[in-house]
Image (cartoon, helix red, strand yellow):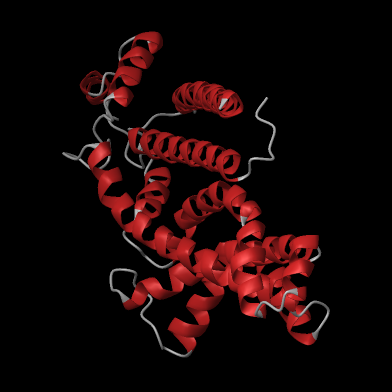
Amino acid sequence: MRWRVFVDTKLAKYILKRLILAIVTIFLIITITFFSMHAIPGGPFLSEKSPSAEVTAALEAKYGLDKPLGEQFVEYLKGVMRFDFGPSIKQRGRMVSDIIKEGFKVSMKIGAVAAAIAITIGLVFGSLAAVFHNKFLDKLIMVLSTAFVAMPSFIVATFMLLVFCVELNLLPANGDTVGGLVLPVIALSLYPMSYITRLTRSSMLDVLGQDYIRTARAKGLKPSKIIFKHALRNAVTPVITYSGPMLAYILTGSLVVEKIFAVPGLGKYFVSSITNRDYTLIMGTTIFLATLIVILMLVSDILYKIFDPRVDLS
């Protein structure tokens, strides 16, 4: 009983420490993003036809850009705490928070499906590669996983767009339709799927060599029961650890992939905000995505400590 209380206390201290670190990290992200955007030469109202000084002054007063920089930062920080990133400079009449909500609904669906595919197929392929170690299937899976790990998602997305949408005309190139979301999901899932395959294979090979697995085989247990009930359950810990970075990769990769396939997600708005010099939308999407990634990494670390009691919590 005392040992359990001691472990729970250590776990609570670890979670608290990680939570404080996450809050500090998010504050630094907001600070760096805000001051970096204000340090960029030029301004959000510059275009091919520059407005007059009177018009520029009126616009700066409307968006609060005429105030001292420190005062702007404090006001912006208060707004971020309420999930209020201010109005979009280029998309008149729209709030940045509304744009983020609208785009993230689509990005979240694509990311969730891509993550589910990556984890499911990665665990299956990794297990098969470990079971058929050094055989043809193992070598084939490792060659394919190495190839997909080496290729960035935007390269895969561009290649699939040319082959399946332009040359073969099998799928629509527009991400507005359900069929048009197939290729973006595949492009986003290939890298994490391949990485999980390699992680699972390595972990499974280590587990399959343990004494309790040999004991299970000696007792005459079915190979499928040994693999899925005993070996895979204990080999899945590295995958849990990788879940945070995987979701972060899918989120950041979707920024470019969504633009390639014209998916009306958060990536489309983010890329267009850069080209249009929409400063408030750039800051809002950057802070939102970075904060989401920090939270996902925090959850991943906590789950890793919970699922693997061997890890030192000090």
Depth check: give the residue in front, 62 or 97.
97
Would you say 226 lies left or right of 281 here?
Answer: right
| 258 is higher (above) or lower (below) than 270 | below
- Taking the image as drawn, is residue 204 in sight? yes
Depth check: give the residue in front, 97 or 117.
117
Q: Residue 191 occupies which quadrant of the picture?
A: bottom right
Q: Residue 71 occupies which quadrant of the picture?
A: top left
Would you say 167 lies left or right of 171 here?
Answer: right
- Taking the image as drawn, is residue 142 in sight? no
- How far from the left and from the top, in percent, is residue 195? 65, 62
- How far from the left and from the top, in percent, is residue 87? 23, 33
| 73 is higher (above) or lower (below) than 192 | above
Residue furthest to the right in view is 134
Depth check: give the residue in front, 231 or 131.
231
| 174 is higher (above) or lower (below) than 106 | below
Q: Which residue is at 50% across, 51% downward? A: 247
Quadrant position of the C terminus in the picture: top right
| 294 is higher (above) or lower (below) than 177 | above
Quadrant position of the N terminus in the picture: top right
- How far from the left and from the top, in percent, is residue 194? 64, 67
Residue furthest to the left in view is 93
Depth check: give the residue in front, 32 or 13.
13
